[in-house]
Image (spheres, rainbow, N blue to C red):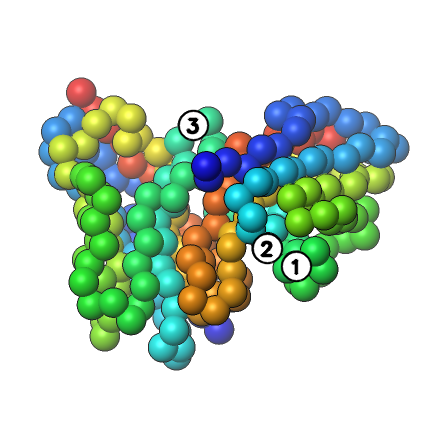
Amino acid sequence: DTEVTQTPKHLVMGMTNKKSLKCEQHMGHRAMYWYKQKAKKPPELMFVYSYEKLSINESVPSRFSPECPNSSLLNLHLHALQPEDSALYLCASSQDGKGAPSEQYFGPGTRLTVT
Amino acid sequence: AQTVTQSQPEMSVQEAETVTLSCTYDTSESDYYLFWYKQPPSRQMILVIRQEAYKQQNATENRFSVNFQKAAKSFSLKISDSQLGDAAMYFCAYRRGSWGKLQFGAGTQVVVTP
């Protein structure tokens, strides 16, 4: 099973709203990622969690707040977003570790629209 | 810094024909991995194929194969017997070791015509 699930599939929110994106994997992977992707562009890395600890924050604005409650779950809390934050948000996971397969598996994404 | 370059914004291929997508990368590392991901209109990112830098043998997955030229830092993807379902954006990606960030190229849009 190489499935990463994400909810919701679509989200429309106003600039004053607070919402959360959820991601789940049951592959025993110890690294999880959030990416932002604009149309016709490659994904841009936002955050990396390794063994449930935040290991990389790519200078993402504080209106995006990641959380990793356990090794299978990853959340992205959204608050006071701007219209330019509208994008596809992708979650991914990988096994990582010396000698481990290094490929990342992606979820289907959440299409976010900020109005 | 590592960079990944895909110089073909779009490639068109007829059904049952073969198309080759190019990718070059720049690195001074010896331990790295290269990937091709496919993103169809649904926008689900799907891993197509993986190549370890230390392996000389080119990776193959069914109709998909790569030509890995380590000295030239080239990693092209060949799609044989193209099918309508192969129509998608294809991203080449690089990862240093087992822990590094995944770096993507700009993508190549593959159009398959009947």
Tell me whether the residue at label 1 lies in contact with that at label 2, contact meaning CB atoms closer than 8 angstroms.
Answer: yes
Q: Position of residue A8 (x, y in %)?
A: 67, 26
Instruction: Look at discs 1 and 3 and give the one toward the viewer.
Output: 1
Q: In this view, does A101 lie above or below A37?
A: below
What's the residue at 67%, 63% (across, down)?
Answer: A55
Please identify the quarter of the rendering in which residue B46 is found: top left
Q: Where is residue B12 in the image (x, y as percent from the top left)?
A: 22, 35
Given residues B108 and B103, the one toward you in this image is B103
What's the residue at 84%, 39% (across, down)?
Answer: A80
Chain ID of residue with mark 2: A
Chain ID of residue with mark 1: A
Q: Mark 1 points at which residue?
A: A51
Residue count near mark 2 (Cα–Cα under 10 Å), binned few <14, some 14–19, many ≥20: many
Give the quarter of the figure containing the C terminus of chain A. Answer: top right
Q: Which mark is residue B41?
A: 3
Check disc 2 and report its element: helix, strand or loop.
strand
Tell me whether the residue at label 2 lies in contact with that at label 3, contact meaning CB atoms closer than 8 angstroms.
Answer: no
What's the residue at 78%, 41% (across, down)?
Answer: A77
The answer to whether one can see residue A79 in this image is yes
Q: In this view, does A111 lie above or below B78?
A: above
Q: Name the residue under label 2.
A: A31
> What is the three-letter code of the residue carrying label 3?
Pro
Q: Distance between the residues labelled 1 and 3?
A: 33 Å
Discs 2 and 3 share one subunit: no
Check disc 1 and report its element: helix, strand or loop.
loop
Residue count near mark 3 (Cα–Cα under 10 Å), binned few <14, some 14–19, many ≥20: few
Q: Position of residue B93 (x, y in %)?
A: 40, 55
Q: Distance between the residues labelled 2 and 3?
A: 27 Å
> What is the three-letter code of the residue carrying label 2?
Ala
